[in-house]
Amino acid sequence: MTFAISAAWELGFLDALQEQESVEIEAFASEHDLHRSSVRAIAEALGCGEIVVLDEDGVVRPGPIFAEVFATKGFFYWLTRGCGELFSVMPSIIPNAARQGDYYHRDLRAVGVACRDMGYQFFDAPFFSFLDEIDFEIAADLGCGSGERLIRMATDRPDLHGVGVDISANALELAHEAIAAAGMDDRIALVRADARQLSPLRVFEDVDLLTCFLMGHDFWPREQCIGSLRAVRRAFPNVEHFILCDTYRSGLLPSAAAPLFTPGFEVAHALMGVELPTLADWHGVFKEAGWELVEQRDLPVPSSTSMFILQPG
């Protein structure tokens, strides 16, 4: 089911249903030069979960839970396209002898696409609500992925300049395409760097707003996190606000009540050797790393996600 949701989104099927409220399989497959039987099989799989309703004439309409699935499609895409290969080789990368060097692969471009949609659906409203409360002129985004957050900020504030930082060349390629399409090449710069080991750069010096979404757990374990956050502080000497939004270890597992994304998220990071902090762990590092937690805003989706509003300590 998860793979069917991701495929339906990537092929444009979910968007067509959202916009048109009904899609005829034969016509959709013909228009997009797709294998008709495969498109029908995906629709039938979605129908098993009441995501869509399929009639005898091959017309598909949104089902009882379509709206919920459409809103959360980025999470399914993160699990399947972003981390699909990781899960497919799970048994072979658990032996300690196999966990050497680059022992796993993820599609970071797909991760960027997924996170862009997650942001649009669930993070943008609380984030931009906070931005309305503060003044800033130059923003930097650590782990910028597709660059959409910076593009939206620059669209809302015509005088704003931005800097996107990401370790992935594929993600930066996606960001470059989006920034060029928005006509903002002269306002948003991109830097390929590891946010866990930042060094001061000229382009960082005047940044007064710093953001970091959904990658803060990559700073851990604890001592490494403290060192990374201190390095961030040194790299951005004039920052006034640091918004760090992250999903942390839930403490819900094992439980049948845990949201679908939670076990996938926590298993994936265990496989990658990433230590997920708890909320208490996060609270325990800010001050030592040179940051003051001014406010915490909890998000309902995904579970165990908070936006920490920090200032230099």
Image: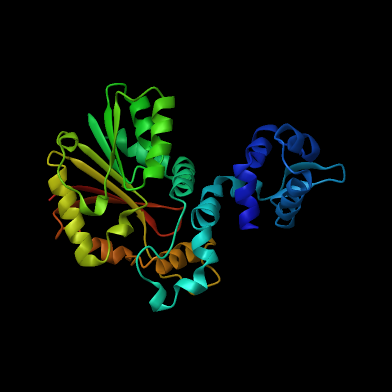
Q: Is residue 104 above or below residue 126?
A: below
Side (left or right) of 202 relative to 192: left
Q: Nearer the viewer, residue 54 or 104?
A: 104
Side (left or right) of 123 relative to 241: right
Identified at 79% across, 47% down, the residue is 54
Q: Nearer the viewer, residue 49 or 104?
A: 104
**Residue 215 position in % (x across, y down):** 34, 53
Looking at the rendering, in which quadrant would you find the N terminus?
A: bottom right
Q: Is residue 146 above or below residue 278?
A: above
Q: Is residue 56 above or below residue 286?
A: above
* Residue 179 shows up from this direction: yes
Identified at 36% across, 41% down, the residue is 127
Q: Quadrant of residue 252?
A: bottom left
Identified at 13% across, 38% down, the residue is 238
Q: How many marks?
A: 0
* Residue 135 shows up from this direction: no
Identified at 21% across, 42% down, the residue is 241
How is the model colour-coded? Answer: rainbow
**Residue 72 position in % (x across, y down):** 54, 49
**Residue 2 position in % (x across, y down):** 61, 57
Side (left or right) of 87 relative to 100: right
**Residue 274 position in % (x across, y down):** 35, 65
